Image (tube, rainbow, N blue to C red):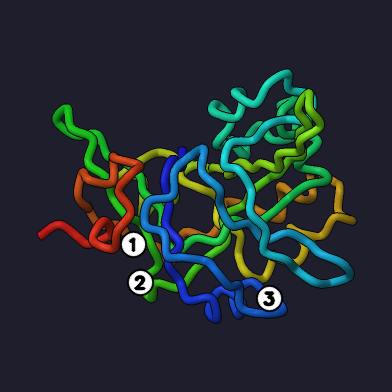
Amino acid sequence: MCGRYTLASAPEVLAEQFGLAEAPSGLAPRYNIAPGQTVAAVRAGAGDARVLDSLHWGLIPAWAKDPTIGRRLINARVETLAVKPAFRDALRHRRCLLPADGFYEWQRRDGVKQPHWIARADRRPFGLAGLWERWRDAQGEIVESCTIVTTQAGPVLRDVHERMPLIVPAEHYARWLDPGRADARALLALLGAGDWRELQAQPVSLAVNNPRRDEPNLIQALT
């Protein structure tokens, strides 16, 4: 699964990586993004434009009776996206990228769950495959929410955890975001196993277990 991640890259770097028209403003560095929080998401805009929006992490399907279901839908397994009622319509019509420059996974060993921060060696940001939904409450208020697609961990990470977020290769951003593409089989084939080859894992402090902690030293490797 993916239960925490980071996004501390400079706005200019994010604009370049994700093809945004301008560098996003007001985007503070975050070192411990947790479920239930507001997260940055890249979605298709008008024409070929891409926009950076804010979504609630924890997908609330349009048919849900109340928003608490989102607590259980922070992740969506790629193996069942096309058949799960909560995800199959979003897969065809509402896809996004969740910008990140690292994510956390926990390795269980000797009864202890040791967090690891996983990132590219060059610390460049990457796009996590996401789905989004629009839900309306009884008062007519709209909540837009998202989930992170997960897959089996690549060889680099299997010793840490058996699952990981699915990273969309940059050359497939346009096709993943294209609202005109609705063939679930083709979309899943596009993703493949994700892009894990540039990733490295390092053990970090147990302080990351506290979602109220959000400071740069959370990603420092243990010595």
Residue at the front extreme?
A: 139
- The residues tagged by marks 2 and 1 sit, at their Cα atoms, a distance apart of 6 Å
Q: Earlier in the sequence, mark 2 or mark 1?
A: 2
- SS for callout 1: strand
- SS for callout 3: loop
- Judge the density around disc 1: few (<14), some (14-19), many (≥20) Cα neighbours within 10 Å: some
- SS for callout 2: loop
Residue 175's image quarter? bottom right
Task: Identify residue type, mark 2.
Answer: Ala
For the point 54% across and 42% down, which residue is it? 150
Residue at the top extreme?
A: 65
**Of residues 12 and 164, which is closer to you in this image?**
12
Residue wearing tag 3: 19
> In screen coordinates, is 80 left or right of 219?
right
Residue 70 point in image, percent of width and height: 60, 29
Residue 187, placed above or below residue 62: below
Residue wearing tag 1: 200
**Of residues 198 and 96, which is closer to you in this image?**
96
Task: Identify residue type, mark 3.
Answer: Gly
For the point 33% across and 44% down, which residue is it? 212
For the point 55% across and 56% down, which residue is it? 167
Residue 97 point in image, percent of width and height: 64, 57
Residue 201 point in image, percent of width and height: 30, 57
Instruction: Evaluate whether residue 159 shows in this view.
Output: no
Residue 112, placed above or below residue 99: above
Circles 2 and 1: CB distance less than 8 Å?
yes
Task: Identify residue type, mark 1.
Answer: Gln
Residue wearing tag 2: 121
- Judge the density around disc 3: few (<14), some (14-19), many (≥20) Cα neighbours within 10 Å: some
